[in-house]
Image (cartoon, helix red, strand yellow):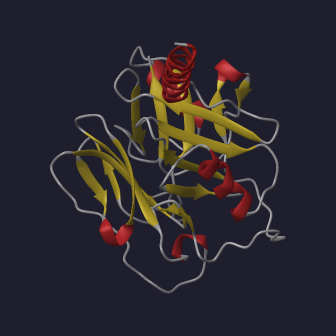
Amino acid sequence: MKMMIFKSTVVISLMFLLAFGLNAQVQSTDRFLVYEVNLQSQTLKMIWKGEQSSAIGNFQNLKTYLAERDEKLLFAMNGGMFRKDQSAQGLYIENGKQLHRINMVQEAYGNFYMQPNGIFYITKDLRGVVVQTKDFKKTENIAYATQSGPMLLIDGTFHPAFNDGSANLNIRNGVGVLPNGNVLFVMSKEPVNFFDFATFFHEQGCKNALYLDGSVSKTYLPSQNWEQVQGIFGVMIYETE
């Protein structure tokens, strides 16, 4: 009888821990600013120019743009690398419309071209996905997509170019998908190397994660007393209420 009670207690405890782990929000740390988004209950979009003739450019401008449409900005993060005219360096889809074609260049200078690079996209049925560029399949079900690079994690393994202890330090931001399907946005609060940045996503259980950008990276997240409204960006990822 005692053994049965013990086994039952263990099973219940494991079930509780599993349920808690699936629903617990990933927390920010002294080193990383973290924001977890449930696409089923939160409104996450991407924007470049919107209805304007030129790029919106930064979060202050985005706040104004949204306020004019009776929307409140809750979260924003720069969403990928861009050219001099602030257009996307790679694939960009907004509201189901492709505004910039996919970039299949394999060898060129810069983080974007550290192969494999990848694409983060949101489907119309509200799923977040991170895939290698070579595996991306454009369908009518894609609402938003942005291409960047390098991939941080590829099916649970680190990008082969990353080195533990690398002195290549920078502010970095990226996106991954958690085991529960939620989207995880992370920005370093201090300069970090690619290996340490990818490690954080790996520790949270992400199988695939994508680097979005580096030194220009900023985040608007007033719920965590983090409001970086200035900067120069191309694509921005944002949440409204």
**At which x and y percent is residue 179?**
45, 41
Q: Nearer the viewer, residue 26 or 44?
A: 26
Q: Quadrant of the C terminus?
A: top left
Between 75 and 186, the one lying in front of the other is 186
Q: Is residue 232 visible?
A: no
Q: Can residue 6 be seen?
A: yes
Determine whether, in the image, residue 224 is placed left or right of residue 48: right
- x and y percent of residue 44 in the render? 41, 32
Q: Nearer the viewer, residue 20 or 235?
A: 20
From the viewer's perspective, is residue 169 above or below residue 3?
below
Give how far across and how far down residue 27 sits, in percent: 67, 29
Q: Residue at x 58, y 51 (%)?
A: 174
- Judged left or right of residue 238, residue 91 is left
Please, which residue is most extreme toward the bottom here?
A: 107
State the residue lying farthest toward the front: 1
Identify the residue at horizontal 55%, vertical 46% (top origin). 205
Indicate the position of residue 109 as horizontal and vertical percent values.
59, 82
* 148 shown above or below 56: below
Question: How many marks on residues?
Answer: 0
Left or right of residue 230: residue 165: right
Q: Residue at x 56, y 23 (%)?
A: 10
Above or below — where is 105 with respect to 182?
below
